[in-house]
Amino acid sequence: MSAAGALDIQKVNKSYVHEGRPKLVLSDINIHVEPGEFITVIGPSGCGKSTLLKIVAGLESKDAGTLLLSGEPITGPSQNKGVIFQEHRLFPWQTVEENIAADLSLKKSEIRRKVDSMIELVRLQGFEKAYPKQISGGMAQRVAIARTLLRNPKVLLLDEPFGALDAFTRTHMQEALLDIWHTNRTTMLLVTHDIDEAVFLSNRIVVMDAQPGRIKHILFVDLPYPRNRLRSSFQELRTLVLRALEHHLDSGKEAGWEI
Ligand SMILES: Nc1ncnc2c1ncn2[C@@H]1O[C@H](COP(=O)(O)OP(=O)(O)OP(=O)(O)O)[C@@H](O)[C@H]1O
Ligand SMILES: [Mg+2]
């Protein structure tokens, strides 16, 4: 039996039908995520990152393999798996606080207390009554994160959550996400295109390849938090990930690589 928050992805395969024929999109995906671990998945466009995340979220079926959260099979979407997409998906007709509280079946006073603590966590005090169109993209994404965290998920699944944001807001959001992770210790599985983001955030980086989507390498990021992008150790890890993505890595023979 795995500990609460552990995520096991074992021998997962997935095909889609393309031009009348099955096309293998994910091949033999194996990842064990420790409870409270921060894992980033990086790889070229079309390698199946979003498909993998949707399968883990229970939003998409798999053809083969096993998926376990806290040792229990994943059979569909549930509140113990929070999902954040690139676009925030807030209800435009609801305020920030209404969006965060949406569909919660709790007593009013309980909701107020929880919403207030979430608004504080994502630093949106003063914007409780604003509508999505009145706040920035970064703020809207923080509302989406707050709404998801309020459901107390065991694992947070993030698909390029900061992809649509400018570089400055993106850096700020990465720091905010680390704050939240340090406070809540939620297990994190984040998909990104951004090497810098992967090295800045994660305990381990899963590097994927395309056609079919498969795992090429898994890298331990052995740097203390908070990480400094200007340090040479940070730059060295960036280079290592880049080389792994560009096929220049001698698999298994370089320090830091699991496979
Ligand atoms: N619903 C679907 N039906 C058919 N094919 C699909 C479907 N969803 C994804 N695919 C195909 O599966 C492959 C993987 O897609 P996916 O969206 O998972 O890639 P990705 O790694 O997230 O790419 P990106 O970095 O561009 O977001 C692609 O070839 C895509 O065309
Ligand atoms: Mg994608």
Image: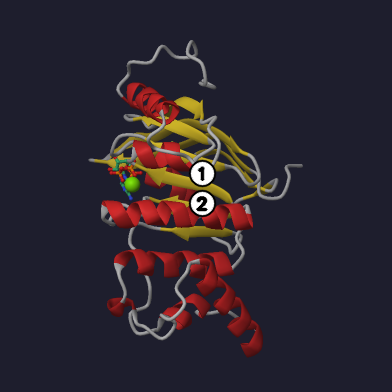
How many numbered discs, if any?
2
Q: Amino acid at mark 2?
A: Leu
Q: Residue at x 44, y 82 (%)?
A: 128
Quadrant assignment, res 88: bottom left
Circle 2: element type: helix
Residue 173: give x, y in percent of width and height. Answer: 40, 56
Nearer to me, 252 or 194:
194
Position in image of residue 28 (x %, y %): 49, 29
Q: List the residue tagged with mark 2.
A: 178
Q: Is residue 214 visible?
A: yes
Judged from the image, the quadrant occupied by ligand 1 is top left
- Mark 1: amino acid: Pro
* Vertical position of residue 10 compared to residue 92: above or below: above
Q: Residue 206's spot in the image, x, y percent? A: 46, 33
User: Do the numbered discs 2 and 1 sit on residues whose CB atoms are within 8 Å?
Assistant: yes
Classify 10 Å Cα crowding around label 2: few (below 14), some (14-19), many (20 and above).
some
Q: Secondary structure under badge 1? A: loop
Q: Determine crowd level at label 1: few under 14, some 14-19, many 20+ residues with C-alpha closer than 10 A.
A: few
Nearest to N terminus: mark 2 or mark 1? 2
Residue drawn 71% across the image and 50% down it? 4
> What colour scheme has been applied to the protein in the rendered image?
secondary structure
Q: CA distance from mark 2 to mark 1?
A: 9 Å
Residue carrying label 1: 226
Taking depth in this image into account, of 1 and 196 the one nearest to the observer is 196
Q: Horizontal and vertical percent for residue 64?
A: 52, 37
**What is the residue that sits farthest to the bottom in this orientation?**
108
Residue at the spot x=30%, y=54% of the render?
168
Left or right: where 226 falls relative to 138 = right
Tell me: residue 158, above or below residue 145. above
Q: Is residue 72 left or right of residue 225?
A: right
Kindly tell me whether residue 161 is visible in this rendering.
no
